[in-house]
Image (tube, rainbow, N blue to C red):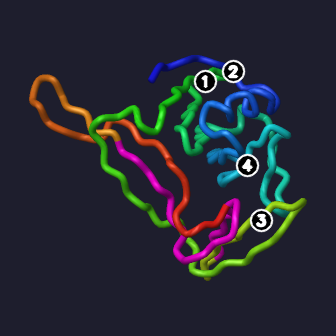
């Protein structure tokens, strides 16, 4: 696991890094303004959820997680236009705790766009998120691996990193 510095531009850099985490399509969790949610990255480009046309101005986002079967790229903004990141293979950590964290959504709606299925999950109060694929159970969950590390002075254990492994309750 190596930390790198980079400056995201366009979408080619995402398509190139997709192969680091998956042989086929990879998922991207974007967090920022104007969008927070999941996209799909394939060798053909970036696919966003139905009815959404988010900006590809990376200065509007602060955290990106590109994940697949082989691992995760975690990228975070460190300042004005500067980004850092790390690539972690799914089997790289020796001490970890796997969890399935629930996404919001007590209701779901499936939609197909250009041969890809998406599921919209939402709550009565209006919170909505789209996930790639077809939901097979609610709540849909994120499979997250938390890395356990130790403070050298005290031996106290804690979570020092996390990576998304995929979804539970979604057929891709």
The local secondary structure at tag 1 comes to strand
Q: Earlier in the sequence, mark 1 or mark 4?
A: 4
Is 52 situated left or right of 20 in this image? right
| Disc with the residue nearer the chain's start (3 vs 1) | 1
Most frequent secondary structure within the magenta stretch: strand
- The residue mark sitting in front, 1 or 4, is 4
Nearer-N-terminus badge (1/2): 2
Q: Say which mark, if any, is on residue 117.
A: 3
C-alpha span from label 1 to label 2: 6 Å
Mark 4 lies on residue? 40
Name the residue: 54% across, 34% down: 74
Residue 121 locus on image (x, y percent): 65, 72
Residue under label 2: 7
Based on the displayed image, in which of its 4 quarters is residue 58 positioned? top right
Query: Magenta segment: does it hold 110?
Result: no
Badge 2 element? loop
Tag on residue 83?
1
Q: Which residues are magenta?
A: 126-146
Q: CA distance from mark 3 to mark 4?
A: 11 Å
Determine if the magenta segment contains residue 132.
Answer: yes
**Place of residue 35 in the rendered image (x, y in percent of width and height, measured from the top left):** 71, 51
The answer to whether 58 is drawn above or below residue 27 in the figure is: above
Q: Position of residue 126 (x, y in %)?
A: 65, 75
Q: Is residue 155 above or below residue 44?
A: above
Q: Please tell me which residue is depicted at 71% across the width and 69% down the height of the picture.
A: 119
Q: Which quadrant of the view contains residue 105?
A: bottom right
Q: What residue is rendered at 38% in x and 37% in y?
A: 161
At label 2, counting other C-alpha atoms closer than 10 Å, the crowd grade (few under 14, some 14-19, many 20 or more) is few
Q: Secondary structure at mark 3?
A: strand
Return the x and y of residue 127 as percentages of the image width and height: 63, 70
Seen from the viewer's position, the closer of residues 20 and 33 is 20
Instruction: Tell me whether circle 1 and circle 2 mark residues in contact (CB < 8 Å).
Output: yes
């Amino acid at each position: 696991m190596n930390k790198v510095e980079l400056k995201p531009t366009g979408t080619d850099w995402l398509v190139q890094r997709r192969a680091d985490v998956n042989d086929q399509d990879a998922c991207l969790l974007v967090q920022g303004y104007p969008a927070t949610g999941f996209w799909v990255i394939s060798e053909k480009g970036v696919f966003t959820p139905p009815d959404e046309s988010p900006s590809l101005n990376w200065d509007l986002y602060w955290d990106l997680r590109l994940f697949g079967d082989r691992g995760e790229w975690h990228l975070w903004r460190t300042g004005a236009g500067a980004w850092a990141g790390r690539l972690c293979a799914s089997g790289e950590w020796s001490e970890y705790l796997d969890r399935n964290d629930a996404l919001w959504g007590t209701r779901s709606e499936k939609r197909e766009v250009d041969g890809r299925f998406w599921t919209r999950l939402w709550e009565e109060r209006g919170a909505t998120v789209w996930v790639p694929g077809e939901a097979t159970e609610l709540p849909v969950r994120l499979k997250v691996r938390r890395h356990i590390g130790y403070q050298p002075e005290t031996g106290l254990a804690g979570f020092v990193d996390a990576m998304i492994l995929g979804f539970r309750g979604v057929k891709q």
